[in-house]
Image (cartoon, rainbow, N blue to C red):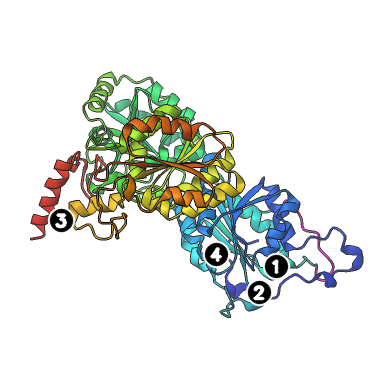
């Protein structure tokens, strides 16, 4: 089977037929398309999918249970994609989501784009209208293959029943291979219903597992000349830093990273995708860098004379003004995706290689003697801690830090998008890899709760917490129904400030405090103190409607006991609404397109920056 995308124009006559077309003696044990799909999924190790039924995928839903596949029905297809992401991110396996045609398929698109941005391995399966209706604007028809082509590794429209096994095999190879990512399989309804036939009209037993040519060769270790250049540059460096990202997590290379960093004796800073890849309490840990990363990490990486960039993509939220990022240091960039090399930042030594194998090679480096540099970085860390709000009520940073302490950083944490996401990045000390799940590259609000559902399904034995914001949670609050319906014991901690907090913070800095459409409180209320009687929407009432236990805290002295109640039963879904300081801001903050020297550390800095922006616009 070709690995190229199949388009509507490629659809001809199908190699299928109804049961009446099959000879009576062949009917026993015959498998129609939907059953072939389910059997193929089982051969890939799939035992759970996240989805929503509709007219064009009912054939698939009808047979899943017969093949030992559980379907968790979410309340919205976007939630299915995010749940598949959470499952994949927490387990390291390929997550699977299932939707019907038309709006069901297009509702998956945001989750697919999110998975593409964060290199998350998922296979999205969609039903479509029968082949004879393709391209005719039939009810709930959409060319989903063309829509997702730019945001998937591959997308297949299955035009023959006999091609289903190969399509599934290829989808899983691509989704999990090399740099992981999303793949889509679109299956018209008649392909699901029909039986594969040979040219004479006889039932053709499908070959499973399918035998396909490997579509891409696995990428291995670096070449010897590249290794020697690496070792030479490392030996010459006086101020080296390791800058690591999600590639370490995808490769399962956290043990090799730790061994290499300790042998070399150099500090390590991570992206948000790399959280958990390096022990947060380690003396060499510089935590997260970038726009809302630690000031000490940003200083160290920009003052280094050599940066080893491992499994990162030099995202703009990390680099700021890219021409000034690591302006005076040499960069070695190792990544499994060749297209990332020299894409955003030109480096002295670009290497396309598998991270885990490369780190095993680099262990040959001579033990480092960078004590003075490491001591300087430790002083930076002591001098520039993350700022913590101390205004009134519950400090969001302290609340998350307390949760981290009470769980010893051992929970799987998912987050929505906004201020709470950055506070969680800073103050939840994830002790293990695959334990901090965030929509990092795409920034999708509503990601946190469904991703937590997927993670809990992958690891029912572990504590799973969605640290969410009131704005972000409101986009996915209906998935509380999924938690209750299937007994999925996700804990939701709402960092509730009654604002689209990150939007408000940018409005204060750039738009002269014009807080347009960022206030989430009740517009009909005359009370603007945002006290206990003025919370909108009322998540407690909403949770009650979904039969999920919930409570609210408004004072710091209530918090620890409330967390104890929340965490008491790891298998019971429940929600804690934490009303925090409504004016707390996220610091540090490097304005978009600026440099680490322009970092904002306080409200006073923000006010000064706001005045500069106003003056420059005069």
Q: Is residue 141 one of those drawn in magenta?
A: no
Quick one: quadrant of the N terminus? bottom right
Within 10 Å of disc 4 (Cα), the crowding (few <14, some 14-19, many 20+) is many
- Which residue, given by chain and number where applicable, does mark 2 sit on? 131
Name the element at disc 4: helix
Whole-number angstrom distance, CA of label 4 to CA of label 3 = 41 Å
Do the residues under discs 2 and 1 have CB atoms within 8 angstroms? yes
Query: Does label 4 or label 3 sit earlier along the sequence?
Result: 4
Query: Does label 1 or label 4 sit earlier along the sequence?
Result: 4
Vertical position of residue 546 compared to residue 369: above or below = below
Residue 323 x %, y %: 23, 48
Name the element at disc 3: loop
Q: Is residue 189 visible?
A: yes
Residue 158 x %, y %: 64, 65
Return the mark for residue 191.
1
- Which residue, given by chain and number where applicable, does mark 4 sit on? 105
Query: Does label 1 or label 3 sit earlier along the sequence?
Result: 1
- Residue 488 in which image quadrant: top right
Whole-number angstrom distance, CA of label 2 to CA of label 3 = 56 Å
Question: With 321 as the anchor, is 578 left or right in this view?
Answer: right
The span shown in magenta is 198-211
Whole-number angstrom distance, CA of label 1 to CA of label 4 = 17 Å
Query: Does label 2 or label 1 sit earlier along the sequence?
Result: 2
Whole-number angstrom distance, CA of label 2 to CA of label 1 = 8 Å
């Amino acid at each position: 089977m070709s690995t190229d995308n199949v388009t509507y124009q490629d659809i001809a006559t199908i190699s299928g037929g109804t049961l009446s077309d099959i000879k009576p003696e062949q009917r026993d044990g015959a498998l129609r398309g939907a059953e072939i799909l389910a059997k193929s999924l089982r051969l890939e190790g799939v035992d759970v999918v996240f989805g929503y039924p509709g007219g064009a995928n009912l054939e698939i839903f009808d047979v899943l249970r017969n093949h030992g596949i559980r379907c968790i029905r979410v309340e919205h297809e976007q939630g299915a994609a995010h749940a598949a992401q959470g499952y994949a991110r927490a387990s390291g396996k390929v997550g699977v989501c299932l939707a019907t045609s038309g709006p069901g398929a297009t509702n998956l698109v945001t989750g697919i784009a999110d998975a593409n941005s964060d290199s998350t391995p998922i296979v999205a399966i969609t039903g479509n209208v029968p082949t004879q209706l393709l391209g005719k604007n039939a009810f709930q028809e959409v060319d989903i293959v063309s829509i997702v082509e730019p945001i998937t590794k591959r997308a297949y429209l299955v035009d023959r029943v006999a091609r289903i096994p190969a399509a599934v095999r290829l989808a899983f190879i691509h989704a999990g291979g090399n740099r992981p990512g999303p793949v889509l399989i679109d299956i018209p309804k008649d392909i699901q219903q029909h039986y594969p036939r040979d040219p004479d009209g006889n039932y053709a037993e499908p070959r499973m597992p399918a035998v396909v040519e490997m579509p891409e060769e696995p990428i291995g270790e670096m070449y010897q000349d590249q290794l020697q250049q690496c070792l030479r540059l490392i030996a010459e460096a006086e101020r080296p830093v390791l800058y690591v990202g999600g590639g370490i997590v995808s490769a399962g290379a956290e043990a090799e990273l730790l061994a290499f960093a300790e042998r070399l004796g150099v500090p390590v800073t991570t992206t948000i995708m790399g959280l958990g890849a390096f022990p947060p309490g380690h003396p060499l840990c510089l935590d997260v860098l970038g726009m809302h990363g630690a000031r000490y990490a940003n200083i160290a990486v920009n003052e280094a004379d050599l940066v080893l960039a491992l499994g990162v993509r030099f995202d703009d939220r990390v680099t700021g003004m890219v021409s000034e990022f690591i302006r005076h240091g040499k960069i070695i960039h190792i990544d499994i995706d060749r297209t990332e090399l020299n894409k955003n930042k030109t480096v002295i030594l670009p290497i396309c290689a598998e991270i885990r194998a490369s780190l095993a090679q680099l262990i040959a480096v001579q033990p480092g003697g960078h004590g003075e540099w490491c001591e300087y970085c430790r002083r930076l860390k002591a001098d520039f801690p993350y700022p913590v709000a101390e205004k009134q009520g519950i400090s969001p940073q302290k609340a998350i830090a307390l949760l981290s302490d009470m769980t010893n950083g051992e929970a799987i944490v998912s987050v929505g998008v906004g201020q709470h996401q950055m506070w969680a990045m800073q103050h939840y000390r994830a002790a293990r890899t695959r334990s901090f799940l965030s929509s990092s590259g795409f920034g999708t609000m509503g990601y946190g709760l469904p991703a937590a559902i997927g993670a809990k399904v992958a690891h029912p034995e572990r504590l799973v917490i969605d640290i969410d914001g009131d704005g972000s949670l409101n986009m996915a609050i209906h998935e509380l129904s999924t938690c209750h319906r299937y007994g999925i014991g996700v804990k939701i901690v709402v960092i509730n400030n009654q604002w689209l907090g990150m939007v408000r913070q940018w409005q204060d800095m750039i738009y002269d405090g014009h807080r347009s459409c960022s206030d989430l409180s009740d517009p009909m209320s005359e009370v603007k103190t945002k006290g206990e009687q003025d919370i909108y929407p009322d998540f407690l009432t909403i949770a009650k409607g979904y039969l999920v236990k919930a409570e609210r805290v408004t004072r710091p002295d209530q918090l620890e006991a409330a967390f104890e109640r929340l965490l008491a039963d790891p298998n019971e879904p429940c929600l804690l609404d934490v009303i925090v300081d409504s004016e707390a801001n996220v610091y540090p903050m490097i304005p978009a397109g600026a440099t680490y020297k322009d970092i904002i550390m306080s409200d006073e800095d923000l006010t000064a920056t706001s005045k500069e922006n106003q003056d420059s616009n005069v």
